[in-house]
Image (tube, grey):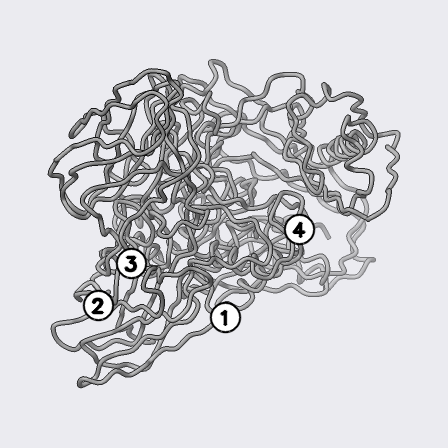
Amino acid sequence: MKFSLLPANRRSFLQWISAVLGMSSADSTTAAPVPALQQSPTSGSGRIDSEPRARLGGYIRPRTIEIVHQRFELIVVGGGISGTCAAVSAARNGLKTALVHERSMLGGNSSSEVRLFPENTAAQSTWCKESGILDEIHVEERIRNHDPQIEGLMNCHWDLVLYEWAAREPNLTLFLNTSMREVEMRDAAHILAIHAVQLGTEKSFVLEAPLFVDSTGDGVLAYRAGADFRWGVETKREYGEPLAPNEPGKGLMGNTLFFRARDAGRPVLFRRPSWAVEFDAEADLTERGHRFIDGGYWWIEVGAPLHPIRDNEKIRDEALRQVLGVWDHIKNRCVDRARAANYGLDFVGFWPYKRESRRVIGDYVLQQKDVQNPPVRPDDIAYGCWGIDIHVPGGIHERHIAPYPPPRRDANWQSYGTLPYGIPLRSCYSRNVRNLLTAGRPISTSYVAFASSRVLPTGAIVGQAVGGAAALCRRFHCDPRELAQKHAADLQQLLIRQDCHIPGIENEDPNDLARQAETMASSDAVMRFAEDGRPRELHYPSAQLFPISAGRIDSIELLLSSSLPHDVWLDLGLRPAAHVWDFRATRDLARARAKLPGGHHGFVRFDFHADVPANALYYVHLPAQPGVSWSMISDIEGQPSRIPAGTSAADLPGADYWRPLSGGTCFVIRLSPEQRPYGPHNVITGGSRPDRWTNLFESDPERGLPAWVELRWPKPVRFNQVEVTFDTDVNRRIMLPLFRYPECVRDYEVAINMKGRWKTIIAETGNYFRRRVHRIEPVSADRLRLRVTATNGARAARVYAIRVYNEVGV
């Protein structure tokens, strides 16, 4: 009796299993040749083709314990943070979802098995920390974790929170330690099922669904389904990208192993194994920072000429040689080695952090122009803003060759910097496999754009977005392409309601009853800057953005210092800003001139007397002026009222656009007349972070707490759900242990007015999350009041949004 080891479809697979389980060893003496893996249609550059399998002799002795066939509405393959967010998002939106992950813990590169920390992008630009499901996980993990969140230091608490967020979803089934082996196609354009094995249980699974998400990082599901993909570097000719090379390249960015070291309190010896690399001198690690010795480093990176998939094991072996060689250098050869005398290795990774692999081609390929001069597209569903971070393909082996410089330096910002850019749905599905979505590294980009979009937090918010997209595919009975063409606006509204951010998109939900209300509050804050700071010399043109609520600017004062012995005249220009990141205006609305005396330190007034549209963003800019400094403050340093739409920027002579100065910094200014951009109306204007306006209600910190904000309707409305978005500071990256965002509201009540009397319907204490959804018994009221009695440290109540719904079926 002859049979195939790899049946062509599910029916033959099950028939084959039945036959195998029913035969004895005497029934078979030979096995048929194993068919070659299905070849994918050639597309793009650098295809990997599988070699035919060798013929096998002998006979098969089956010992399969159990074969499980299950059907879901969505199957997500790959449980990194992009896949986890995709699965949780889909499950929350009502889809029966399976999350299939080959490791024992979720998180992928961010897990404690690999330990790349999921640093948000707030250091790349202002007001751009990722929100939604990723923020929930981050906030919870920081509260629980006693370690700072740094490369090499990721520990079990991140794994546990990811697992908890997935395990508590009733619509989500986890398949951990489960490896997808084969993809079964319904036809050339549709996946029918995946075949997977779970080695610990010795079970085999056939998992079927109408929709799939590839969040494997390597595009494994897409590749086995025959999806078109790209590999490696395109040339300038293909997309007209200035950063692309003139000739195609095959070398991909490398993989990294992290380590963790601990202070043992007494000397710890380390002897380099004979097989490890030797780094005798500092020159052997040119420009490699290694002063932080508790964990790291991203630059212990092994890449070309090794292949990131075929040579995965060789890369691991070589990376181990490099890691132990670097540790030997720190312990025994570094000029500052005494610092490390008491340190011993606590962890060395054995699963490399992979940066690059296949990119699945969708209906749109995100390119360099999209990330540096971004438009607003009708099907944008997420965003990115990491710099174009192209690593040297050879990694640590090329340590004597000057690497691509990091994107945040003044010297190369114009080449490698980005503006916060939208990522369209058309880049998040396969163009030829109609029921396949993508999240994380495999989305549809050019190599240059991929160098920005590849980072963990961007993958996570794309994951949440495609999870929502899958839910709407079911609602509208369509595939992802049709969803992008006909229902993209519905998806955008769903996502921003669930605390995703899409640049330029605001709340237009007709079911949100709060949009029909008027607002009032106990108080609101005045915009104030601190009146001191550290001087920053005007080596480059510099600017400060601010919101204007009054519709007029009489004067603007700047805190300036001069080290010059003589007076100078300075020209200050005023320009509009479309959003908090947009310094692309080329014409001044008005200009003012003022004299700065030699040796002066203090405020200098520029008179404008200009009428401008109210409730809009503007910025003022000064030219480069050596010897003159404009004082800066950090809004993280406890200022009385931070500027939610504030940002600052500096550019280079002849620059095309400005570089944000991140980290919560802004230049010191005074405005006349007084501006009040944090009023109660902001809770229903549609944004949940600064974008085209502040979008924040902030009570007057001088009046303290409690404080309240109220919705008033012309007549009673009936509702059963209240959703509130607080503030967990989308303008900074937090790595501190056991941390709670002080801005976030802790204790609050929601009350309604019924026949002239207030009745509390919601009461919460100990909150630290940004978004809270409260489902209640249906009530009717013409007034709703959110009353804040305590925060986690701030003196004012800060609320981005209040939504009110009468949900059917809740």
* Discs 2/3, front: 3
* Discs 2/1, front: 2
Write down the residue under mark 1: 170
Instruction: Give residue 513's mark.
Output: 2
The CA distance from mark 2 to mark 3 is 18 Å
Secondary structure category for the residue under label 3: strand
Give above or below for 568 relative to 444. Answer: above
Give above or below for 125 relative to 413. Answer: below
- For the point 47% across and 39% down, which residue is it? 123
Residues marked 1 and 4 touching at CB (< 8 Å):
no
Q: Tell which circle, 2 or 1, labels the residue nearer the N-terminal end.
A: 1
Task: Answer whether residue 425 is visible to the viewer in this image.
Answer: no
The CA distance from mark 2 to mark 4 is 44 Å
Left or right of 381, for residue 326:
right
* Number of other residues with Cα within 10 Å of mark 4, as a class: few under 14, some 14 to 19, many 20 or more: many
The CA distance from mark 1 to mark 4 is 26 Å
The picture quadrant where one finds residue 167 is bottom right
Write down the residue under mark 4: 112
Q: Position of residue 61 (x, y in %)?
A: 79, 56
- For the point 32% across and 31% down, which residue is it? 543
The type of residue carrying mark 1 is Pro
Q: Position of residue 391 (x, y in %)?
A: 57, 27
* Discs 3/1, front: 3
Write down the residue under mark 3: 697
Q: Tell which circle, 3 or 1, labels the residue nearer the N-terminal end.
A: 1
The picture quadrant where one finds residue 345 is top right
Secondary structure category for the residue under label 1: loop
Viewer-closest of 783 and 67? 783
Secondary structure category for the residue under label 4: loop
The CA distance from mark 3 to mark 1 is 35 Å
